[in-house]
Image (cartoon, helix red, strand yellow):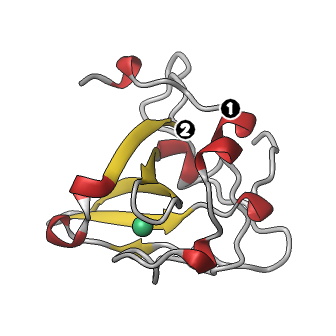
Amino acid sequence: MKNQDIALLSSEALKLISQSKPSECNCALKHCLGWESVSDDRWPADQMQSKGTLREPLQDGQTEPSFEEFHPDGTRYDSPQAPIAPKHFPYNRCDVFACQKCGCGVMKYTEYGGYYVDNRVRLFNPELLVDVSL
Ligand SMILES: [Zn+2]
């Protein structure tokens, strides 16, 4: 499936995906309150339903989405309380899933290092969603 075939999610659509709070998650992803590395064998693919993406089409001359993060209150990349800002890193390269088991919304992207690829996963918490531009 190509990127273009996946629907780009608005903030409103994103909020509707999450049917329960991250704290109520009781599946394999429950520790992913902040960004966590989740290998393919730990990703519960059977119960995850693809809902769309936060990846916007790239602008002319842009080769990948921005790496700028959004932390107005001193949080860090992997803080459980870090705001979810869809236009900022790493949300701007995420696909979004809904867990059929516990009702949680889940964001996922792949980190490409020199010698590895690493899937990062975070439960979606509507209370942390902020709609700010870059
Ligand atoms: Zn779950």
- Amino acid residing under circle 1: Ser
Q: Are marks 1 and 2 in contact (CB under 8 Å)?
A: no
* Residue 38 relative to residue 75: left or right: left
Secondary structure under tag 1 reads loop
Q: In which quarter of the image is the C terminus?
A: top right
Residue displayed at 67% across by 43% down: 16
The part of the image, by quadrant, that contains residue 124 is bottom right
Amino acid type, mark 2:
Leu
Does any atom of ligand 1 lie closer than 8 Å to the CB of label 1? Answer: no
Residue visible at 53% across and 61% down in the picture? 104
Residue 88: where, in percent of width, then height?
Answer: 65, 49
User: Is residue 87 at all visible to an observer of this figure?
Assistant: no
List the residue tagged with mark 2.
54
Q: Position of residue 93 (x, y in %)?
A: 47, 44
- Front residue (pair 42, 134): 42
Distance, label 1 to label 2, CA atoms, is: 8 Å
Looking at the image, residue 44 sits to the left or right of residue 58; the answer is left
Q: Quadrant of ligand 1?
A: bottom left
Label 2 CA crowd tier, 10 Å (few <14, some 14–19, many 20+)? many
- Looking at the rendered image, the quarter that the N terminus falls into is top left
Give the quadrant of residue 44.
Answer: bottom left
Estimate how packed mark 1 is, as few (under 14), some (14 to 19) or many (20 or more) residues with alpha carbons within 10 Å.
few
Q: Residue furthest front?
A: 101
What is the x, y in percent for residue 23? 61, 79
- Residue labelled with disc 1: 10
